[in-house]
Amino acid sequence: MKKHKQFFTAMFFVLPGIIGLLVFRIYPILASFFFSFTEYHITLPPKWVGLENFKELFHDPLFIKSLQNTFVYFIGLVPVGLVVGILLALLLVKDFKGVSFFRAVMYMPSVVPIYAFAVVALNFFNPYLGLVNGFLAKLGVPGPLWTADDKLVKLTIILIAQWGAGQQAMILMAAMKDIPKEFYESALIDGANKWQIFKKITLPLITPAILYYFITSSILALQFFELPQIMFGGGPNNASLSIAIYLYRHAFRYGNMGYASAMAWFIFLISLGVCILYFRTSKKWVFYS
Amino acid sequence: MNKKFSIQALLHAIFLILITIIYMAPFFWMISTSLKPNYELYEFPPKLIPSIAEFTNYSKALQRFPFFIYFRNSLIIAGGAVLGVLISCPLVAYGLSILRWKGREIVFYAILATIMLPNAVTLIPTFLIFSRLNMVNTFWPLILPSFFGHPFYIFLIRQFFLTLPRDLFEAAKIDGASEFQTYFKIALPLIKPTLVIVGLFQFIASWNDYLGPLIYLTNEKKYPLALGLPQFLDRYGTLWNQMMAAATIAVIPTLIFFIFAQKHLLESIKFTGLKG
């Protein structure tokens, strides 16, 4: 009897969480799985078409293009973002006078709403009136057509995304702060130089944080949406189109819920594959002290 | 030794100045452009600092665009979502850490696993749920889910509850307090600092959310800043000074928030390593 009462009391506490789990997580996963095998225009009931959507995806030149673009974004956001984050963290990990000011400066762009930041960045990189090319002109260098050239927009977007590197820098910095000082002291006695210390001590000891960063940033990179959408709407000539933007177009502009669900599941499976890959290889490169 | 050391210090200082210039440049450029008179907008190379400060750009931008309506909408959405997570997440976390019952671990790990779920997968069915409930073009889709817990915050608060000595709760029970009294009188006051962090994270996440409003809100009267500002770009894209004035006004609340909350934010990042 008492057990029952306990269970019901507990249920009262966790009920919101269980409803949230069922309604906003588990049901949508299953539903989008089902929709991905249907032709489902928002105005009509879903019609079963089997693997048709997935076949169509790989014959859809725009999807292929969005896939290639997303791959470029992935490289520019995950590994490049890690290098930028490590550099920032190394600069600001030691406590010195005024360090908190610099940490705030580095972290500030990550807090600013992306929709405002995207608008500012668009002008900043504008080839004909922006600050970047203005600066290059002063140096007598002809500036690239950052935002106007199909070949360059992805690079421009990746550069702009590095302003958010303060976030990963914070995580990596926290990991660096946890490294016992004795490690460094004994390395200095052995006469190791800075690079050797970084390679032999700092880097191996922050690998758990790097694994965490890889997982979270990869999931986000595969759904990269805001910057290319707000700045270019996926253009010019679909040069900045990501899978997430293409999914958004099909679901919310053309109303093709089935086709868009197939894309969503595609993103899901790639995310899952990437995470499994990280965990599988983590035994080789993640160092738990 | 000493000389080597000073060269290192100099290099460090140079890098710091570079980082500051690079990371502050967008803010500087935004404010500088927002004060430029029209005839200085298209100069090339552009002036770093406008020759006169044209403050009327701000009033013009505010007239062109119903800033206060957008601002109010952003506030309602963010405020509602913060209220939601502050009510639901501590409740669920308490049930998953302090209370003992059959199936607790399974429920906890199921909730935890969904932290890594890509949004893209749940986006469409969630939209269809709200569209059946006739909630498209209302704020509900952006607020309601937070009343049903957020996996990351639940995890965070649960971790905190687990660090508290159990005797606290046992003693209250022996004194005849019900589970709810124990929760409200003992558990909640103890996790105040965590709740501040959770509220902060959610506020910034809602205020900065773009995709959610984009999908659910089509009526301009319902627009938050997230939709109002890029729309300004579409309509008055050539009026960069007013555009930047609008962007500055949209950024100010977050920056004020950031300056006040900076200590909390940076500390919480240290122990969670994640932004909400």
Image (cartoon, coloured by chain):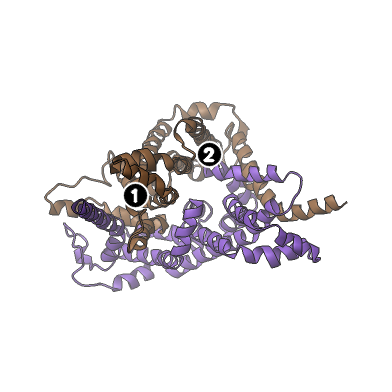
Chain colours: A brown, B purple
> Which element type, helix, strand or loop, lies under badge 2?
loop
Q: According to the image, label 2 marks what residue?
A: A256
Report the front residue among B203 and A186: A186
Residue type marked 1: Leu
- Between the residue at mark 1 and the residue at mark 2, the CA separation in whole angstroms equals 47 Å
| Chain under disc 2 | A
For residue A200, say whether it is visible. Answer: yes
Report the front residue among B271 and B22: B271
Is B94 left, or right, of B11 in this rendering? right
> Which element type, helix, strand or loop, lies under badge 1?
helix
Q: Are marks 1 and 2 on the same chain?
A: yes
Q: Tell me, yes or no, whether the two marked residues, 1 and 2, touch with CB atoms within 8 Å.
A: no
Residue A90, disc: 1
Residue B245 percent coordinates (x, y):
33, 66
Residue A126 percent coordinates (x, y):
25, 52
> Quadrant of residue A27 in the image?
top right
Report the front residue among B199 and B166: B166
Residue type marked 2: Asn
- Residue B90, above or below B131: below
| Chain under disc 1 | A
Q: Residues within 10 Å of mark 2 (few under 14, many from 20)?
A: many
Is B216 left, or right, of A197 in this rendering? right
Closer to us: mark 1 or mark 2? 1
